[in-house]
Amino acid sequence: MNSRPACDIEALADDAWLLRLGDRIDPELNAAVHAMAARLRALEPPWLRDVVPAFASLAVFFDADEDPARVHAKLLALLDDEPGASHAQATAAAGDVEIPVLYGGEYGPDLESSAAELGLSPQALIERHAAGDYTVAMIGFAPGFPYLSGLDPALALPRLATPRASVAAGSVAIGGAQTGIYPRESPGGWRVIGRTPWMLFDPRREPPARLHPGDRVRFVAIDADEFARLTDAQDAAS
Amino acid sequence: MRNLHVLSAGLQTTVQDRGRSGWRHLGVAHAGALDADAARLANRLVGNPLDAAVLELTLRGPTLRLDAPSRIALTGATASARFEGERVPSGRPVDLPAGTLEIGSLRGGARAWLAIDGGIDVATVLGSRSTDLRGGFGGWQGRALRAGDVLPLGVGLRLDTDTPHAPAWWIDPAHDSHEPIRYRPSAHPAATALARRGWNVSASSNRQGLRLQGLALASPGGDGVSEPVAPGTIQLPADGCPIVLLADAQTVGGYTKLGHVIAADLPRLAQCVPGQPLHFAPVDGATAYRLACAARTRIARIGVMIDARLAAV
């Protein structure tokens, strides 16, 4: 790790540069994105307003009063300086989060059909989903919605032909080769296999999101009693 | 304490300030007044801090009851506003006693901003009072106003007036609506073709995006790998009809990018009405920066003029 990964830089807006490291969904590329994001955040240049990592690219938003050409030059200088340690920095910055999930039943309306489509028993689908080591590849679609990479390829499922008009908040779902969690009730086309009692995004909380880009995530299967207990505990805390 | 009573809400009236920055990595949109300069000038006219919350009005404004004397200012598209039947002019500070302010329809644009002395005193959420309509937070209960809402106003000028009063001067920071919208094209082959066709603003446009109708561009179809997007990003979905993202747009997207509308021209997009013809012209980065600086200077100059006029009263 003694040089920065090759990347294209293009203008995303008059106050943002887009750094593109690749054009595919790949764990190593995504790790490099998070490493670069962690490094920029740690350096904290005064013109920096936000670093937005995605699968294979990241956006660097800067003070709109700055000359974009000068920020571009400073950005290149920052990325070329202080090589190394960037992956370690990203690893240190990322959190480890265990997310409790009640799989199946009314909270996982697509569990049985999904398992049948994959040629698995519902229990086997739960076990394999909960056995995965996931990474928050990016957050998007809605505030706090984590796109999790690391899904067992044998569990990949196409999205529903007709998206649901309403998916409950906390729904844990599979969409293509990824898994994710709906932070808020919204329309959605992913296969819902369970639900977490956790509120993933609350704008009145500090920090507002439970999960951050680059975090490592594991799912822990819980039963209905535990779901109710955790829901009550959370309501009492908020 | 003064309150603002919403008697009728208008088409889409929201509480906005300069918006949220620094939270896009968590999927939080920018929100904020679609023309931040116009909102800022409205605040300046009533003596507010420039980041005080104002109301953004869309096509048809609300009817509001003020329960105490207040100073108001309207900027943006011209409103046919009346206070207890008497015409209320735009672009200047207007002192009003308690009573009913009917904004009515907007002319010559899609949006106007209404500032009231003291500002709309809603809670700050993630550093802003702006309404995040998709996220359902910020502003007034995370949604557009409805009849029956009662919004608190901050401590303002404590006016004591029993007749409406407006000065004879006004500001007119109107944009030239006939010039093409300038954009920085991306490297995509279809990026320059955008400027060679005429477009119309679709009626399905909203604060998330301005949808364009016209002869469809060749689109690669389907989604690519999602990347960050920003207000101003020009997306090309599978149907070949571009979408220009606005302040409420989501933070990542998989559509092909044709480039972005430059900062100096973003406020003009706020005024696009359904059916309006629209043209685009490509510019380079240096031009975009020069135009952004020129726009800032122009707004600063209007601000200085406002302060001079207010001081002369």
Image: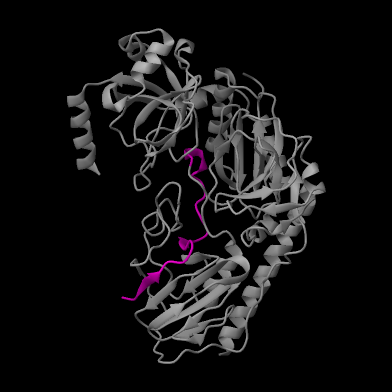
Q: Splitting the image into 4 quarters, where does residue A188 fall?
A: top left
Comparing B163 with B211, the one in front is: B211
Image location (x, y in percent) of residue A112: 34, 16
* Residue lying at the far bottom of the rendered structure: B163
In this rendering, the answer to whether A233 lies above or below B295 is above
Residue B310, percent across and down? 56, 84
Decide if residue B26 is on the left or right side of residue B235. left
Rendered-image quadrant of the C terminus of chain B: bottom right
Count how many numbered circles sit on residues in the image.
0
**In the depicted view, which residue is nearer to us: B144 or A74?**
B144
Looking at the image, residue B165 lies above or below residue B172 = below
Location of residue B232 with respect to B121 vertically, above or below:
above
Q: Quadrant of the N terminus of chain B?
A: bottom left
Please indicate whether residue A104 sits to the left or right of residue B168 in the image: left
Residue A102 in view: yes
Would you place residue A2 above or below residue B158 in this image?
Answer: above
Name which residue lies at 36% across and 59% down: B123
Is residue B46 rendered to the left or right of residue B228?
A: left
In magenta segment, residue A161:
no
> For this rendering, which residue is in front, A153 or B304?
A153
Res B278 quadrant in image: bottom right
Whether the magenta-drawn stretch holds residue B13 is answered as: yes
**Which contiguous range is marked in magenta?**
B1-27
Identify which residue, B310 or B12, lies in the foreground: B12
**Residue at the spot x=19%, y=31% of the render?**
A228
